Image (cartoon, rainbow, N blue to C red):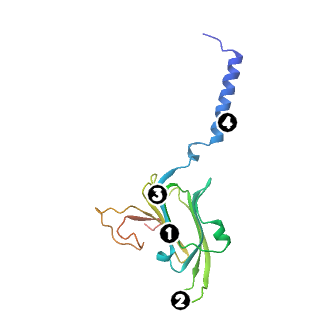
Amino acid sequence: MKNIQPRSLKCLFASLMLFGLTACATGGIMDKDVYQAHTFSFDTMRDSPNVEVLDYQYSNARHAGVRAERERINMGQTFGGENIYGSLLRGDFLYVKWRVKKPGKLLPEYLGTYEDRVDLRSRLPADITGLRIHFVVRGTQLYIYLVWPYDPKHDYPPGELRGYERQKKVQIYPDQAK
């Protein structure tokens, strides 16, 4: 059996250290960003006419993802809707801030301002390709739905989510009583 030279051991040790440091610096497999072709949307004009969205973000901890424009937030503008499709970063969370208007008033009066941040990691399936993540605000409550593409072979019963009456849809937040 051949003896290993101290110089070879040092070289091997240095190589292993370099490999380990590189692995730590680039992050583990759980830190990898996942991009999948899907849609993120909301439409307060149709779904929540007495609600004004003040801020929103669909993202993860490492990237901005889909979010409200900072300039518009700083100017006090509101957001009536969003509909983005593409190879989007799979979000770990959805954050929404909104205010509720008093119904029937000519000039806006507000009942209150609310916000919610929902952890989506355990609520989304592994593959969301082709799906839509759609949120609706009803009063003080945020609702998040997964909507599947229209399939003419299946006729799903109409639900409370307007615009997607005949599509498969599942409410993923808040949790529903079983």
User: Residue drawn 60% across and 88% down?
Assistant: 107
Measuring from the top left, give residue 80's x and y in whole percent: 54, 73
- Secondary structure beneath label 1: strand
- Secondary structure beneath label 4: helix
In three-dimensional space, the C-alpha distance between marks 1 and 2, rounded to whole angstroms, equals 23 Å
- On screen, residue 154 above or below 90: below
Q: Which residue is mark 2?
A: 104
Q: Residues within 10 Å of mark 3 (few under 14, many from 20)?
A: some
Q: Is the Cβ of the residue at disc 2 closer than 8 Å to that at disc 3?
A: no
- On screen, residue 37 above or below 97: above
Q: Earlier in the sequence, mark 2 or mark 3?
A: 3
Q: In the image, which is nearer the foreground, mark 4 or mark 3?
A: 3
Front residue of 78/92: it is: 78
Q: Amino acid at mark 2?
A: Gly
Which label number is shown at residue 38? 3
- Secondary structure beneath label 3: strand
Which label number is shown at residue 42? 1
Q: Residues within 10 Å of mark 2 (few under 14, many from 20)?
A: few
In three-dimensional space, the C-alpha distance between marks 2 and 3, rounded to whole angstroms, equals 37 Å
User: Residue drawn 62% across and 53% down?
Assistant: 62
Q: Earlier in the sequence, mark 4 or mark 3?
A: 4
In three-dimensional space, the C-alpha distance between marks 2 and 4, rounded to whole angstroms, equals 62 Å
Measuring from the top left, give residue 105's x and y in whole percent: 56, 89
- Secondary structure beneath label 2: loop
Q: Amino acid at mark 4?
A: Leu
Front residue of 63/100: it is: 63
